[in-house]
Image: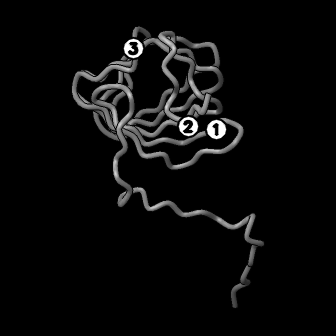
Amino acid sequence: MSTVITNPPELQSTFVDSANMPWQPTEFEGIEMKLLYKDDHGRSTILFKMAPGAVVPLHEHTDLEQTYMLEGSLEDDEGKCTANTFVWRPGGNKHIARSPNGAVFISIFNRPNKFMDGAKFFTSDE
């Protein structure tokens, strides 16, 4: 005998069929995304796809950022994140991210990034 737990609507799980979501362009050439989660506090979870040679320009992580690499690689001056590896960056970290051979990865942000050229982050409404 199993117990059935019924949460009220505001506490129920939300399932996202990411495989059937279309890739959305970003303002950065060669970078597409699927926005899996976003809330009013600036938190987001995003599946990214970068074409070979694509670059995320100089930006600052305004809070903790976590990335798990599914395919390919993402590089900066501090190192390289390859398939099945994980990297996290504290708030205040600044870097330029490059993907020489292309990449697919999932990133979790506590707040949107701040781009040095004034570009708005993918989830920024400012």
Q: Amino acid at mark 2?
A: Ile
User: What percent of the width, then of the height, locates residue 45?
Assistant: 54, 42
Q: Position of residue 118 (x, y in %)?
A: 51, 14
Task: Identify the amino acid type marked 1.
Answer: Arg
Residue visible at 60% across and 63% down in the picture: 14
Do the residues bearing badges 1 and 2 touch, measured as CB atoms within 8 Å?
Answer: yes
Marks 3/2: CA–CA distance: 18 Å
Q: Secondary structure at mark 1?
A: loop
Q: Which residue is mark 1?
A: 43
What residue do we see at 71% from left, 38% from top?
Answer: 41
To which residue does mark 3 refer?
Answer: 76
Mark 3 or mark 2: name the one nearer the start of the chain: 3
Q: Which residue is mark 2?
A: 108
Secondary structure type for disc 2: strand
Of discs 1 and 3, which sits in the foreground?
A: 1
Front label number (1 vs 2): 1
Alpha-carbon span between mark 1 and mark 2: 8 Å
Q: Nearer the viewer, residue 38 or 91?
A: 38
Q: Residue furthest bottom?
A: 1
**Alpha carbon separation for disc pair 1 and 3:** 23 Å
Q: Which is nearer the N-term, disc 1 or disc 2?
A: 1
